[in-house]
Amino acid sequence: MTECLHKTRPCLRLEKDGLPAARLYVSPLPDSRMVSETEGSDPLVMNSILAGAPYQILNGGQRFRLSEAVSIPVSTADQAETDRLWSALIADGGEESRCGWLKDRWGLSWQLVPRRLGELLSHPDRAGAARAQDAMLQMNKIDIAALERAFEGA
């Protein structure tokens, strides 16, 4: 699917440095790329594809700020992918939060959610699912092995 087939796209309004942000966002995720870069060291608008979905970044100045009210959840395949994305997104001034949430250095919130977490939380063994959830609520970056130990009651 190409970006031309999408009628809408989210727009992330940053104060400045949209181009380095766009480049970071497309670098760690498969099926991601820059679509257009206008001339200049920090152009007004950058259009990109993020994991197959179109989005744009607008260098909009200081009037509006990003908040946790908007985030980008990413479903990760395994611990290695979770760790890789986590490290890339908190680098150079990002900050960890709870339950798989983090903020990158521009203030954009992300939630890295290993697929295994969903499997454990929706498991028919409701007691095991509750233990996995309790363990997740104590984590910053999600640790799949620790979730599985909690699920098993270890």
Image: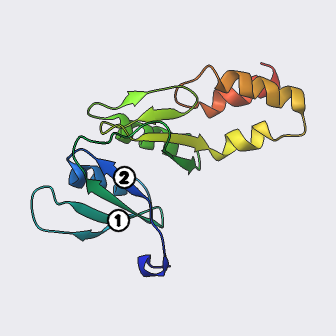
Mark whose residue sits in front, 2 or 1: 2
Nearest to N terminus: mark 2 or mark 1: 2
The residue beneath circle 2 is 12
Judge whether 74 appears above or below 3 on screen.
above
- Neighbor class of circle 1 (other Cα within 10 Å; few <14, some 14-19, many 20+) is many
Q: Is residue 148 visible?
A: yes
Q: Nearer the viewer, residue 102 or 78?
A: 102
Name the element at disc 1. strand
Mark 2 and mark 1: Cα distance apart in space: 11 Å
Q: Residue at x 39, y 41 (%)?
A: 108
Residue 23 picture location, percent across and down: 27, 55
Mark 2 touches mark 1? (CB < 8 Å): no
Name the element at disc 2. strand
Residue 56 picture location, percent across and down: 35, 61
Q: Nearer the viewer, residue 65 or 48?
A: 65
The residue beneath circle 1 is 48
Q: Amino acid at mark 1?
A: Ser
Left or right: residue 77 versus residue 26 is right
Residue 69 picture location, percent across and down: 50, 39
Report the number of numbered marks: 2
Residue 112 picture location, percent across and down: 53, 41
Left or right: residue 105 versus residue 118 is left
Q: Residue at x 35, y 57 (%)?
A: 26
